[in-house]
Every structure is written in C-alpha cells, then in structure tokens.
Image: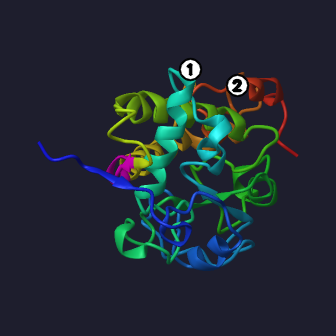
C-alpha cells in the first residue's frame, strides 16, 4: 500500500494558519452570511456592523493549543496541517484548493453593535436592514466566542487529530494531507452557526427577534451565542447586550 505522506514543503508553500489583515480585503463582498453562500458583505459597517469570522479559529492551530494524546503527537499533527495547503483566511494563496468563495473558512457575522443599533424594545421600531438569526461575533456578553473556540478544538481532536497515525520512523519530517478533513470542519461549523442562530428556547422563543423582545425569557441569549452550550452569557439575559 502506497504511503500518502509528504515532506513538509518550504515555508512559502505551506498551509497558511496565521490570521492576516488581508483576509478582510479578500472576503469583502465574498464571505457573506453562514447561510447565504456569500456575495453580500459590503464592508465592516454595512449593511450593519459586522466582522470577519474564521470558522475554524486561528487559536486552534497554534502548537500550544493542539490537544493530542500523547501530547508529543502534536508535532506530527502540525506537519499534517502544514503539508495540506489550506488557507485559514480563505485567501488567494492555495486558492485553487480551497472551497468556493463564500464557502471556505471565512464568514461575515454581526457584532453586538449590529443588534444594539437595529433592534429595539418594540418590533415596529426595528431598523432595516438588520441581522436575523445569526450569532453575534465578539468576546463579550452573549457572543461566547471563547466557548465556541473550545468546541472547535475538541471537534478537531475527536474528528481529525485522533484519527492520524504516526510512524515515527517512516513519517519523520513528513505529514499527511488532511485538506479534505479541514474542509469538512469548515462545512460542519458553518452549518452549526446557521443552526445556533435559529434556536428555540425552552419557553418557545425562536430566533433572535423573538428572544430579543422577551426580556423575561431566562434563555433569551441562546440564538445570539456562537456556543453550542452557552455558559456565562446566561448571566446577561435579563438585559439587552449594550
């Protein structure tokens, strides 16, 4: 059986796993919402305040955050990542190997400000355009980006890192191409963001509009959270995330 491992290429030919400011330029007009397939991101301020989100976050690909058993396996995992010619920014490097524009590792997401500026206490006072049924991007309040990151780290370990088998002699300085598996991760979490933004609370409020309006719902932060299992955000649910 042929060995499917490759030597780690020169730095210029390796996967791009560091976030770069250039992804804002590349994804402008391309990233779109998680469900739209792209083509409607005007800027970071239109159609409402938004931000570029790495579906598989950069933090998950630093050597210190790759979780393996045994821990020493992470060096082999990193080699597998580097030989796969994947671009965390969905950018032009290795573009021919990435998913279609609007279907790669980048997606536009509303910020907390997007909801604060376009939603109101009365539905008749909501502004148009406005985000609907999309988790908010950011690091405070209801977003819970940090919990999302931990969920992605666990998924990567369970679904990819743990499946990789290293032969320390045969695979010295080599890695296995896992581009298709990384793209599976992009698809999985893109779909998850769509699902999470449309969740229904135990009280019966479905999506961001109904949950915003019902200040008495103890789980009203649910569709605004990027996390599958929201945590600390629940302490903010009695007020709008201003």
- Look at the image and say whether residue 176 sits in the magenta stretch: yes
* Residue at the extreme left: 1
Q: Is residue 145 magenta?
A: no
**Circle 2 Cα neighbour tier, 10 Å, few/some/many (<14 / 14–19 / ≥20):** some
Q: Is 19 positioned to the left or the right of 2 in the image?
A: right
Residue at the spot 43% in from the left edge and 72% down from the top edge: 94
**Residue 163 picture location, percent across and down:** 34, 30
Q: Earlier in the sequence, mark 1 or mark 2?
A: 1
Q: Crowding at label 1, few (<14), some or many (≥20) Cα neighbours within 10 Å? A: few
Indicate the colouring scheme.
rainbow
Q: Circle 1 is placed at which residue position?
A: 202
Closer to the camera in the image, 240 or 27? 27
| Magenta span of residues | 175-181
Q: Position of residue 5 (x, y in %)?
A: 30, 49
Residue at the spot x=55%, y=43% of the render?
197
Q: Nearer the viewer, residue 67 or 220?
A: 67
Which quadrant: the N terminus?
top left
Give the total of numbered labels: 2
| Mark 2 secondary-structure assignment | loop
Q: Is residue 186 above or below residue 238?
A: below
Q: Which mark is residue 217?
A: 2
């Amino acid at each position: 059986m042929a060995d499917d491992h490759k030597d780690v290429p020169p730095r210029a030919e390796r996967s791009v796993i560091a976030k770069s400011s250039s992804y804002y330029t590349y994804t402008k007009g391309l990233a779109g919402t998680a469900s739209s397939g792209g083509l409607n991101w005007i800027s970071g301020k239109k159609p409402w305040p938004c931000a570029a989100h790495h579906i598989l976050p950069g933090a998950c690909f630093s050597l210190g955050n790759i979780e393996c058993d045994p821990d020493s396996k992470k060096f082999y995992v990193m080699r597998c990542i580097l030989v796969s010619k994947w671009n965390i920014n969905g950018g032009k490097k290795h573009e021919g190997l990435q998913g279609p524009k609007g279907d790669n590792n980048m997606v536009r997401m509303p910020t907390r400000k997007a909801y604060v500026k376009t939603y109101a206490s009365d539905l008749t006072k909501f502004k148009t355009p406005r985000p609907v049924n999309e988790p908010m991007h950011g690091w405070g309040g209801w977003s819970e980006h940090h919990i999302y990151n931990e969920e992605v780290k666990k998924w990567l370990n369970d679904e990819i890192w743990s499946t990789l088998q290293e032969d320390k002699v045969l695979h010295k300085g080599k890695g296995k191409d896992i581009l298709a598996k990384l793209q599976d991760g992009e698809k999985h979490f893109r779909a998850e963001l769509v699902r999470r933004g449309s969740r229904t609370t135990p009280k019966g409020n479905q999506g961001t509009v109904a949950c915003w309006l019902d200040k008495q719902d103890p789980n009203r932060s649910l569709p605004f959270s990027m996390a599958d299992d929201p945590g600390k955000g629940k302490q903010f649910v009695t007020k709008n995330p201003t």
